[in-house]
């Protein structure tokens, strides 16, 4: 029996009739495998299409009895005639296989859509707390999860970080809450999620190469709020997030909760005299506020920079919406450890701080990192993803000691510095050899950095031109920094009182 698009749309719940449904899965990373593994358990008829696949994962497909096709994919897809296609996030709407599905009228879901429909797999059906934004998603997801756990909830971080959502919904014990980090790619293919609470942390131009336009990117981010049931959390310092909430179709009774680093109004979470306070989730929010923690306490655990404080405020709002007490939230914050590759100090030597923010893969994230320091030797570049870097360069020239350009898209950066910071020393690392890039960066940084400077890896670009991913890029930077420091110690050239050598090179 052939299933129509309406039949497929009606498949909601683990016990629906998934058996025999013809499904094509596009992509075989961890997401693609989680989809295939889930649908195999549901006895769907399935193929996986992937021109590239990790051999270990491909071997696992054999174990669960699913066919993997690697060649002539569009022809194989047409021959299979799927009734549903589930795409991995890397497949843009302009990908030929996706375009074939659209033209054939085949329903297209992402793994998040599938997971939402199957969330009743366990008798303990979890509420979903959904998090997106151009910058800060992972930290906010981890913070929110830690707060829920401190409050006695069984919660897990999943989605674009941590576990695959489908693995979480199939957990035999189940959870009270899934804290789901969602990229714009995942949101594009999401149609029916109705989160308990949701947040878009901020919006800046990113991933234009995937979405095709800024408007399409913003529309994908705005989807996070659709059908939210309890709290739509938005950024008081980012008007776009407020507009998203105002335009969203939500469940009756859902509240709009603002967060920001200024004085909070009723229904907001913010700062009063450097104290984090809640004026949203208490009976008399018009005349009182509840203290959660202080900026000084946040600073002791690496959460005191402006963008980290914003992440904390958003996570507090989400946790409070789930009835976690201020005391439990404070406990979670004081025990929290920031993620690697996010404003991570590698070492301080001779008055110079070396900081890894390799996860700053777009200008918005790089701006947040740059704002945390007064004088910066900036390591920048990679794949710019169609984003204009000019404003970032122009807005930060006064805080820059020098810039070191890496990656494939150096010409756009070179032009931006020439126009907006012509007197700034600018270095280029023109090697394509992965193992040489970061040692060269460190050598150049040592030559120009002065006491009081921060050498900051905040590339404002993706990493896949030269590195496996942002983590590989950050790890190689940290390794090169430590290796250079070790060599200087071995040679007897460095103490904390030494002035580092500096060379002014006009760019």
Image: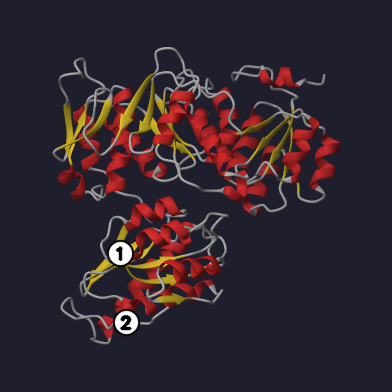
Q: Residue at x 17, y 26 (%)?
A: 290
In this view, the residue farthest toward the left is: 273
1 or 2: mark nearer the eye: 1
Report the residue marked by disc 1.
Answer: 399
Residue nearer the viewer, 175 or 217:
217
Q: Residue at x 23, y 86 (%)?
A: 492
Q: Quadrant of the C terminus?
A: bottom left
Q: CA distance from mark 1 to mark 2?
A: 29 Å
Do the residues bearing badges 1 and 2 touch, measured as CB atoms within 8 Å?
A: no
Residue 52, percent across and down?
69, 53
Report the residue marked by disc 2.
Answer: 487
Residue 108, percent across and down?
68, 32
Residue nearer the viewer, 81 or 352:
352
Element under disc 2: helix
Residue nearer the viewer, 463 or 24:
463
Q: Quadrant of the N terminus?
A: top right
């Amino acid at each position: 029996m052939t299933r129509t698009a309406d039949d497929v749309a009606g498949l909601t719940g683990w016990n629906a009739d998934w058996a025999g449904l013809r499904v094509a899965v596009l992509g075989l990373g961890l997401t693609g495998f989680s989809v295939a593994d889930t649908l195999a358990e549901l006895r769907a008829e399935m193929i996986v299409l992937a021109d590239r696949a990790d051999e270990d994962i491909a071997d696992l497909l054999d174990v669960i009895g699913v066919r993997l096709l690697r060649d002539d994919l569009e022809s194989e897809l047409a021959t299979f005639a799927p009734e549903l296609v589930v795409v991995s996030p890397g497949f843009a709407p302009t990908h030929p296989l996706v375009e074939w599905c659209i033209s054939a009228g085949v329903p297209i879901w992402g793994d998040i859509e599938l997971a939402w429909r199957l969330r009743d797999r366990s008798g303990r059906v979890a509420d979903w707390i959904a998090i997106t934004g151009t910058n800060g998603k992972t930290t906010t997801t981890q913070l929110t999860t830690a707060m829920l756990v401190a409050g006695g909830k069984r919660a897990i971080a999943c989605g674009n970080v941590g576990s695959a959502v489908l693995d979480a919904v199939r957990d035999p014990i189940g959870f009270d809450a899934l804290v789901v980090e969602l990229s714009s790619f995942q949101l594009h293919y999401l149609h029916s999620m109705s989160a308990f609470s949701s947040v878009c942390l901020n919006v800046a131009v990113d991933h234009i190469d995937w979405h095709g336009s800024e408007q399409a990117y913003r529309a994908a981010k705005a989807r996070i709020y659709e059908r939210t049931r309890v709290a739509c959390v938005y950024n008081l310092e980012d008007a776009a997030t407020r507009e998203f909430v105002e335009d969203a179709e939500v469940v009756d009774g859902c509240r709009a909760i603002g967060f920001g680093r200024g004085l909070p109004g009723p229904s907001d979470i913010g700062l009063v005299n450097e104290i984090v306070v809640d004026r949203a989730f208490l009976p008399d929010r018009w005349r009182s506020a509840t203290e959660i923690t202080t900026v000084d306490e946040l600073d002791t655990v690496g959460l005191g920079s402006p963008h980290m404080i914003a992440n904390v405020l958003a996570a507090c709002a989400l946790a409070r919406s789930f009835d976690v007490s201020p005391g439990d939230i404070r406990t979670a914050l004081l025990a929290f450890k920031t993620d690697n590759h996010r404003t991570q100090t590698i070492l301080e030597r001779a008055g110079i701080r070396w900081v890894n923010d390799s996860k700053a893969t777009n200008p918005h994230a790089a701006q947040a990192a740059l704002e945390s320091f007064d004088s910066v030797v900036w390591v920048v570049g990679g794949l710019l993803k169609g984003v204009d870097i000019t404003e970032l360069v122009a807005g930060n020239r006064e805080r820059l000691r020098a810039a070191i350009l890496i990656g494939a898209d150096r010409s756009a950066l070179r032009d931006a510095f020439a126009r907006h910071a012509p007197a700034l020393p600018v270095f280029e690392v023109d090697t394509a050899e992965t193992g040489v890039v970061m040692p060269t960066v460190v050598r150049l940084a040592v030559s120009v950095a002065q006491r009081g400077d921060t050498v900051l890896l905040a590339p404002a670009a993706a990493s896949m031109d030269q590195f496996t991913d942002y983590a590989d890029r950050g790890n190689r930077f940290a390794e090169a920094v430590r290796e250079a420091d070790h060599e200087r110690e071995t040679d007897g050239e460095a103490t904390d009182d030494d002035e580092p050598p500096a060379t002014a090179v006009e760019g």
